[in-house]
Image (cartoon, grey):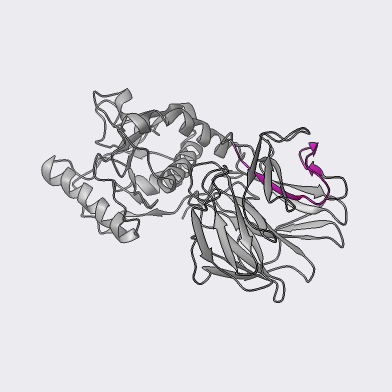
Amino acid sequence: MPAQPAGAAVPAPGIIPCPAWGARAPRPLNVLSNNPNKILIHHTAGSNSNDTSVAHAHALARSIQNFHMDDRGWPDSGQHFTISRGGHILEGRHHSLPTLQAGSRMVEGTHCPGQNNQAIGIENEGTYIDGVPPATLYNRLVGLCAYMCQQYRIAPTQIYGHRDFSATQCPGDRFYAMLPQLRSDVANRLAGRGADEIGVYRPDNATFYLRNGATARLGSVGDVPVTGDWNRDGVDSIGVYRPDNRTFYLKNGNSSGDADGAFVFGNSGDVPIVGDWNGDGYDTIGVYRPDNRTFYLKNSNDNSGAPDLVFQFGNVGDIPLVGDWDGDGVDTIGMYRPGNRTFYLKNSNSSGNADGAFVFGNDGDVPMAGNWDGDPYDTIGVYRPGNRTFYLKNRNDNAPADLAIVFGNFDDVPLSGRWR
């Protein structure tokens, strides 16, 4: 794969090339000398399949190509790229992937009259007149659009819907209404605002110290800190869990003052955790119960008390952690086992074996996770109280740390989040 431009903030997403999904040979195509100047969003107007497998994505791409070539008489798939509901990105029209990787030239499409020689077309599996795309698809779309904007120097404001240039419902009323959010999310990805920063919580004075300079007091001595994006504004803010009354106190800003919400959940002795368990953009509460090795997760911050997900994972003595390990926009659980200094990470919120196991850190380190480089993936790290140093990795593997940052005091609790 060609190297990205120097200083590129957006990594190339995984894209399945035409030969890998069994594409037919196209009829002659026109590779233009100009670069595209915009991106057009389409929906396939087909069924909203629940099959998220790569095999289904391959079959989808073949079906689209057959329809476009055999029924419409086009030389190849009309669109340049396709994203399945399972989040698999596929090259649609031949030559689209290498020209994107090079950031130079484009293959003429057949996806929108008047725009085929200047706009990249992205087909998104499903029909979105009444419903919205699944989070996995949407998050892959953000990454793909950001990469396209980077490679071709397209402004995020130049992301449009098919209906902007043609009399059609495409990409559906609900999806079309999401385009302002898509432009904003792509702009944030390009600006590197997807990267997390570190912080600490000082238990003896119930104060958060965030590395962007913010200092905020919340809660009481004995509370356990949590951080998350409670209101889907793209910024993580502070909260605490009070073991005495099993209550989460959450704020929608990183400043001192009263909590904006208080929610009772869990049992005495539970360990609080938070994450975006369903990919809707909101971080919500959960707990890990050490005595039965069970996670109880909620998809809303409320006082209903009933968890949406319940499953076992890990061993007695493990420390729970949360992250989007596979970049699909959904947070899933993991465990750190102090006895062997190993992180065990799962790509689904369910029982079963870990999807990855990585040795990292020293005895006595405090495990943590975050998105340290702004790519779509959360990765592991540790805080070493003995020298007040964060050791952070940009890949979930067994290699040494990529970053070492001194911050905080010896007894502080490490934190991570997008503070701005």
Q: Is residue 153 above or below residue 88?
A: above
Would residue 400 appear left or right of 86 to someone viewing this image? right
Q: Quadrant of residue 301?
A: top right
The verdict on residue 226 being magenta is yes
Residue 287 location, x and y as percent?
62, 56
Would residue 336 appear left or right of 89 to someone viewing this image? right
The C terminus - image quarter: top right
Q: Residue at x 51, y 36 (%)?
A: 186
Q: Residue at x 69, y 68 (%)?
A: 360
Does the rendering let one see residue 154? no
Residue 347 location, x and y as percent?
50, 61
Q: Quadrant of residue 320?
A: bottom right
Viewer-side residue, 223 vs 188: 223
Would residue 249 appear left or right of 98 to someone viewing this image? right
Does the rendering let one see residue 316? yes
Q: Is residue 258 above or below residue 59?
A: above
Residue 234 location, x and y as percent?
59, 36
Q: Please state the total of marks drawn on the protein image.
A: 0
Viewer-side residue, 252 vs 26: 252
Q: Quadrant of residue 112?
A: top left
Q: Range of the magenta residues?
A: 207-230
Q: Is residue 73 above or below residue 376?
A: above
The verdict on residue 180 being magenta is no
Residue reaching furthest bottom?
A: 340
Viewer-side residue, 413 vs 109: 413
Residue 326 location, x and y as percent?
51, 57
